[in-house]
Amino acid sequence: MARLHLDLPAQFQFETKLNVRVNDLNYGAHVGNDNILTLCQEARIRWYRSVGFKNEISFEGSIGQIIADALVVYKGEAFLGDELNISIAYTDVHKYGFDLLYQILRTSDQKEIARAKTGVICFDYEKRKVAAIPAIVQEKLLKLN
């Protein structure tokens, strides 16, 4: 079976640092596969806040975001107490959303721990259906370039 591959951009628009906590670990004493997506979510929320949004579910009115798909490519192990640098770039903007690409590096040695992609779709939480990207989101994305 072919392995998944994820190309990353030359430039990222945001980065943040997170420490590996005990609840991020699995029985192998390293960050569990499910917790990579949790770390990406925390980084994503920080990214949204840095561009002026309160959180993931309140871009404009009742429109926020949902994750339509996710891909993780593991490159190395991270352990309790490791400081991780998570970089984020957006790409493939379309009528209803965009993709976010993540690179996770251990800061002490710059070892790549994982790469990830999440497909973001705008969602109207009041109407419970997919929504077009609000103009305010498009404007904020354009300002990042």
Image: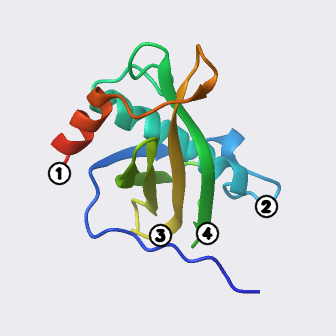
Gap between marks 2 and 4 measured at Cα: 15 Å
- Give the CA distance from mark 4 to mark 1: 28 Å
Residue projecting furthest to the bottom: 1
Residue that carries the numbered disc 1 in the rendered image:
145
Closest to the camera, between mark 3 and mark 4, is: 4
Question: Where is residue 14 drawn, in percent x and y?
Answer: 30, 47
Q: For mark 2, what is the residue?
A: 28
Which mark is in front, 3 or 1? Answer: 1
| Residue 48 falls left or right of residue 99 | left
Badge 3 crowding class, 10 Å Cα cut-off, few under 14, some 14 to 19, many 20 or more, is some
Q: Are marks 3 and 1 in contact (CB under 8 Å)?
A: no
Q: Give the label, 4 or 1, closer to the camera.
A: 1
Residue 48, compared with residue 98, is above or below; it is above
- The one of 8 and 122 positioned closer to us in this rendering: 122
Way the structure is coloured: rainbow
How busy is the neighbourhood of tag 1: few (under 14 within 10 Å), some, or many (20 plus)? few
- Gap between marks 3 and 1 measured at Cα: 25 Å
Marks 4 and 1, the one that precedes in the sequence: 4
Mark 3 → mark 2, Cα distance in angstroms: 19 Å
First-in-chain label (3 vs 1): 3
First in residue order: circle 3 vs circle 4: 4
Q: Earlier in the sequence, mark 1 or mark 2?
A: 2
- Residue shown at 39%/68% (left/top)? 110
Pointer 4 local density, CA inside 10 Å: few below 14, some 14–19, many at least 20: some
Which of the 4 image quadrants contains residue 114? bottom right
User: Which residue does the numbered mark 3 point to in the structure image?
Assistant: 112
Amino acid type at mark 2? Gly
For disc 4, the marked residue is 74
> Identity of the amino acid at label 3?
Glu
